[in-house]
Image (cartoon, rainbow, N blue to C red):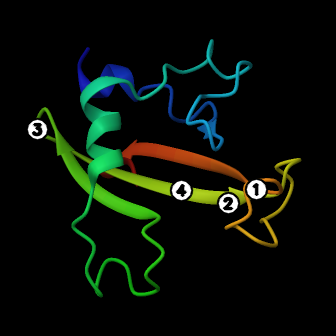
Amino acid sequence: MPTTELLSCRSLRPLPYGPSGSPASDQRHQCPAPEGAIREKVETFDAFTPDNDPHGEHDFGELEHNGDRLFWKIDYYDSKMTTGSEDPADPKQTVRLLTIMLASEY
């Protein structure tokens, strides 16, 4: 599947990924999970530097897939996804939201 087709649904709603790494079931019909090569590139991304990761959080990255530049970002929400988590390191009170988008659309 071309990168642009895979990410064309990005404006609907990003997929929340919990500690299990599985997308929420109500999101699955709106946007495909970042399967295969893109997901693997996000999971194995290790090109963090003081310039692109000044706080050492490892929650943002830039990568290339099929000639397209992509950005990915992990945000940390409370269990109701209404505000930021008070303790992002605590999986009992945190939902992680992974957003992947074409850099050209930022």
Residue at position x 62%, y 30% from top?
12
Relative to the observer, which residue lies in front, 45 or 102? 45
Residue 56 lies left or right of residue 89; in this view the side is left
How far apart in space, not on screen, are marks 3 and 4 (Cα)?
23 Å
How far apart in space, not on screen, are marks 4 and 2 (Cα)?
7 Å
Query: From the image, which quarter does the N terminus lie in?
Result: top left
Give coordinates of residue 50: x percent, y percent.
30, 87
How far apart in space, not on screen, are marks 4 and 1 (Cα)?
12 Å
First along the sequence among labels 3 and 4: 3
Residue 42 lies left or right of residue 31; in this view the side is left
What amino acid does circle 4 point to? Ile
First along the sequence among labels 4 and 1: 4
Q: Which residue is mark 3?
A: 67
Compared with 42, 12 (above or below) is: above
Q: Which mark is residue 76?
A: 2
How far apart in space, not on screen, are marks 1 and 3 (Cα)?
34 Å
